[in-house]
Image (cartoon, rainbow, N blue to C red):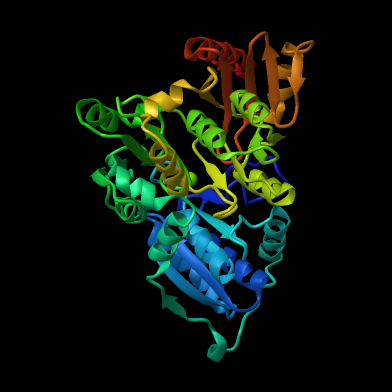
Amino acid sequence: MVEVSKNTRYFGTNGIRGIPNRDLTMDFCLQMGKAIGTFHNTGIVAMARDTRISGNAVFSAVSSGILSTGMNIEDLGILPTPALQYYCKTFSVPGVMITASHNPPEFNGIKCIAKDGTELHWTDEERIEKIYEGGSFKSVDWRNIGTIRSVNTAVSLYVNGITEHVRADLIRKKKFRVLFDAGSGASFETTPKLLESLGCSMVTLNCFPDGTFSGRHSEPKEENLHDMQNIMKNGSFDLGIAHDGDADRVVFFDENGNFIDGDQSFSLIVKCTVKEGDVVVTPVSSSDSMDEICREKGASLIRTKVGAPIVSRTMIEKKAKIGGEENGGVIYGEHQFCRDGAMTAALFLNLLAQGDEKASDLIKELPKYRIFRISVPISRPWKDISKKFSETVEGRRIDRTDGLKIYEDDSWVLVRPSGTEPIVRIFGESSSLDSARSIAVRYREIIENLLK
Ligand code: MG
């Protein structure tokens, strides 16, 4: 399992991740299921999975462990992570999602959801780990072993929940034409249903469950979305929409086929949604444009460490209206306190429905900052080189909220180890994509030299 920076041994920033039958063994999944069941102790656990080939096996192992502790399971089938979270919140039941989000198809993972639909707090993850390591699992008499009930209402519950937060009547009148790419992930049913209910006509790409992700990589980055871009450029669409594997994130293309970065769509939604006095929460990794927009709107901005669970918890604590990350994960508090790709897509359509401006017009009105991201694989733990790296940037203005955010004139670069993979992520922001790229590349070279 990948080493993580927080104190938990198995749960990273987004649950447990690994390659089934290699580091995520079925024995481990079974024992972890027993630990999760022992932790929750009584009642029901809702479970869902994404489209990965190993989904059935991991689901079966984890659920067997949970059932053996006397908990019952509601099996919601293949579903986006935020749809499971919405179900948990609605019925006040804990959940377990079997997913590795945007990771390559060989990965899978276990993510625990609290009764309020948020990611389980890390202190509870620690308790589950203690139970796992101590092996002190609850084991019930044969009569009390749990059972599995299939539930097929989660899709409509989720779609209806989203439409409540937008002006569906206005969106329907516009009859938007949308190109939608599910990347063969968990959104193949939910997002088309949502778009249909909002009166959109749509063409779909990779909109079927395929655990090998043969159509495209499940990370919705521009370089993985060439098919979509070509079709957008040669077709006549108002918006292109693409999710990651478990659809808690979304990216867009404008009507001309130009990629809209997650940071830009987040800025746009914040700009058109917040009012004076509102609170917005975002990590140090997102754009400075957020500061400008919040200042203009009279909203207050809170910066946190990187990681959606940290943003959600801060949002709950500070009663924030909206939060999110630069990677296309927007959290809309009125709906639920977790990243939700389909909710974000509905908010974008809601903006387009307010007037006659096209997506490209709206993007043009945003402050001009661009972020460029790269990552460096690291063969040894980050802590081995972080001291030397700190020395190379000594004397500069540095924000240490998470990793090192180093300011240079009108640019900044954020260098931080990933919580889920053995890589260091580098984010460069500047007034143009070229200068953002050049600062990010310069810091990649510094790190590569330190690794030699
Ligand atoms: Mg995801």
Task: Give how far across and how far down residue 430 sits, in percent.
Answer: 57, 14
Q: Quadrant of residue 71?
A: bottom right
Q: Is residue 184 visible?
A: no
Against 441, is 58 above or below? below
Front residue of this view, candidates 37 and 84: 84
Residue reaching furthest right?
395
Q: How many marks?
A: 0
Residue reaching furthest left?
234
Q: Residue at x 24, y 25 (%)?
A: 233
Q: Is residue 429 visible?
A: yes
Front residue of this view, candidates 288 and 429: 288
Residue reaching furthest bottom?
143
Quarter of the figure that contains the C terminus: top right
The answer to whether 215 appears left or right of 32 in the picture is left
Against 194, is 365 above or below? above
Against 283, is 29 above or below? below
Q: Residue at x 48, y 54 (%)?
A: 81
Task: Give how far across and how far down residue 160 sits, in percent.
Answer: 42, 61
Front residue of this view, candidates 93 and 386: 93
Task: Give how far across and how far down residue 345 sits, in percent.
Answer: 42, 43
Front residue of this view, candidates 185 and 262: 262
Task: Give how far across and how far down residue 180 sits, in percent.
Answer: 30, 42
Q: Residue at x 52, y 30 (%)?
A: 263
Q: Residue at x 49, y 28 (%)?
A: 264
